[in-house]
Amino acid sequence: MTTVGLLHTVPALAATFDDLVGARAPELRRIHVADAWLLDTARREGVTSAVERTVGDHLRHLTARGAAAVLVTCSSIGEAAELAASTVDAPVLRVDAAMATEAVVTAAAARGRIAVLATLASTLGPTGRLVERAGRLAAGPLAVTATVVDGAAGANDRGDRERGDDLVADAVRAAAADADVVVLAQASMARAAARVDVAVPVLSSPAGGVAALLRAVGR
């Protein structure tokens, strides 16, 4: 039996990703680790050395339990996951990596304008840098703008997801007016994508991240 690992910092997203993997590859054994402390610390202090060490510990735990590949579903700790990837003998995948590549390809075929939205500043930097890194491979110049959606994180922290999603949806509509593609930096923002109808692609990370995980294990 093939096993995959998933590392989360938002425990509620474990079920979302489990459903996505299970719908496409129900034969896979899925092992989830959820550590909310990682994101809490990244929001307060940034990605500290303690966060980096803990990410590495979780990756080694998952691979020791047989994970043939690990998907890190939190963009805020994506760079820490890349640093720790060399310490395990299995592919470690960032949930936003496939999305970043798709954004660059889409924008390069148009005017080269990418808008990255996040509800947390701790996520905006890592995903923005990932998109810019992917953009260096593009044939032409790209312009990447990165914006935090004001008020969305506070609404989500209060448990008002409807308000948080509405704010993200409004930000998507505004960004789409000038961009060729809109990137939603956090997996938790995917809900808001269904609320908007704009003329440019709006990319969220869960589906692409899961597809990359399945490719890594030959599914």
Image (spheres, grey):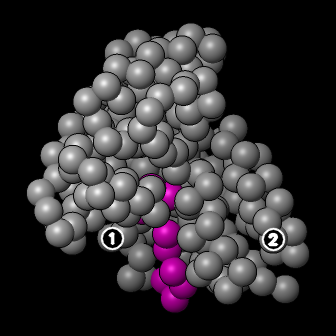
Residue at 41% of width from left, 22% of height from top? 173
Q: Which mark is residue 83?
A: 1
The spot of residue 20 in percent (x, y) is 74, 55
On screen, residue 124 above or below 26: above
> What amino acid does circle 1 point to?
Leu
Of the image marks 2 and 1, the number of the one nearer the N terminus: 2
The one nearer the camera, 143 or 14, is: 143
Magenta stretch? 88-97
> What amino acid does circle 2 point to?
Ala
Q: How far apart in space, not on screen, are marks 2 and 1 (Cα)?
A: 28 Å
Name the image quarter holding residue 58: bottom right
The one nearer the camera, 199 or 166, is: 199
Say if residue 152 shows up in the picture: no
**Eye-nearest disc, 2 or 1:** 2
77 horizontally vs 90: left or right: left
The spot of residue 24 in percent (x, y) is 79, 66
